Image (cartoon, grey):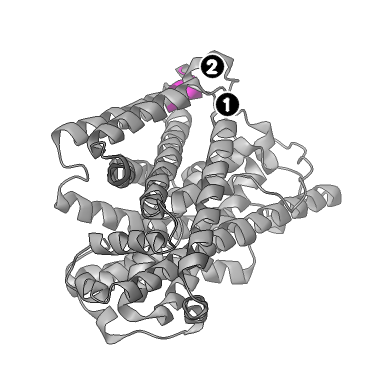
Amino acid sequence: MPIRKLPDAPPSVHILGPTVFLLALGVGMGESYMWPRLVLLFGPEIRWLFLIGVTLQAVVMLEMARYAMATGESIFTGAARVFKPLMWYFFITALAVYIWPGHLSAGASAFEEITGIPWMATAIAGLVLVGVVFSLAKVIYNFLENVLGFLIGFLVIGTAVIASLVGTWADLSSTITGMFAFGYIPAGALSPTWFPILVGSIAFAGPSGMQQMWYTLHLRDSGAGMGAHIPKIRGLAHAGEQEEMPARGFMFDTDDADEMRKWRGWRRWVTFDAVLLFWGVTMLVTISFTVLAQAAARQNPDLINLLREGDRDIALEAMSQSFASAGIPGLGGLFFGFIALIGLNATLGLFDAFSRGQADMTYNFVPGAKRFRLSHLYAGFLWAVIIFGILILLFGPADGPSAILDTLAFLSTLAMGSYCVVLLLVNNRMLPKPIRPKLWTNLVIGFGAVFYLGMLFYSLFRFGVVVS
């Protein structure tokens, strides 16, 4: 890679940044539904597994950032440098997993509860709106960072306020202390019904699947580290202004003391993102929803039995009633508004990330693709996934056949174990020794690979099911 100067790092303490994309992708049904449901079924002590899951994700985030900030390249390019089929594996996995309009459908269903507008009409309108807005944006990253920052802030503050109104100090205390009940595994959690769900919930403690890998592209577009030397992706309406992308990334001189000083500044900047913005905000949202779930269980004594009998919707309905119990008109509907907001956040983040990742791999590794601008490739993947989503909503099951869903869930968790392996290879083989990860970091990422892949295959072979 050509040697360039590393830009000076911004102040470590900041509000917005590329982490907002991970929050938009990660604060979803895992935090608002799956973990509160597990607490209702097995007690708040089960939350120690959530603590492990979200902490592991924070370390993964820091390691994804290491390569991206040092080179300006995505982790997909890093994977191709190690072994090109690794990159194509993720290209195919993204096509298999992330073309289904599940998040938007869930959000549209919640919106129907508030307005009475059929969910399918709202979902289709939302798909088209996302495509139009992304196409008209001058610089897609800047637009999305501002929009998602506002939506996430509203969601976090809103749920925390409502939880403080309907919950008790005992709810909050048990929710927090349960995170430190290490080793607690109730017998029911090891059953064929709940063990796969437990493994899936740990994987969904934060962003799941390939979302951490796409984060490297958002880092690049934010100008983090050597990403400052890479042009930003523009919307289709402004594709003519897209600067030419370099053939490869760049590297700074790791023997220069001043460059290493700036590198440490960038690491402090992204560590603040990982610890306070990512880990802290994800934890706060889950605490709020868990307090709400416990309040709902007090108000509806039959809730736990209904959950055990497989009534999936009852948890969300009970939590809506918990909102309403604060005594303020309209709060029951506001809960469904939050669920609709989660669906919108995830859709905005996923559609952008999917299109960004596929365009990056296509531009750099498909022969002849450089005849097109990167903005054109981004728009092509964006509108392809939108059109596919509309066709599925109109002519097929909104979430795809159940057999496909099982396969997609398997691929999503498989991707997480796989990217841990890729991180170990890329950061320890492709980076200069002074900026490679420390031993403890490699051990944590290695544990992630063993955990995700081990638990997934154990669930598959022991119970014959995959994570769902």
Residue on which disc 1 sits: 139
Q: Nearer the viewer, residue 435 or 43?
A: 43
Q: Verify whether residue 374 appears in magenta.
A: yes
Q: Amino acid at mark 1?
A: Val
Q: Position of residue 206 (x, y in %)?
A: 46, 59
Q: Quadrant of the C terminus?
A: bottom left
Point out the tag, 1 or 2, that comes first from the N-terminus.
1
Proximity of marks 1 and 2: CB atoms separated by less than 8 Å: yes
Q: Amino acid at mark 2?
A: His
Q: Which residues are magenta?
A: 372-378
Residue with the most extreme right position? 258
- Which secondary structure class fits the magenta region best? helix
Q: Verify whether residue 112 appears in magenta.
A: no
Residue on which disc 2 sits: 238
Q: Look at 45% across and 41% down and name the residue there.
A: 349
Q: Look at 54% across and 71% down and name the residue there.
A: 443
> Where on the picture, by quarter, is residue 4?
top right
Mark 1 → mark 2, Cα distance in angstroms: 8 Å
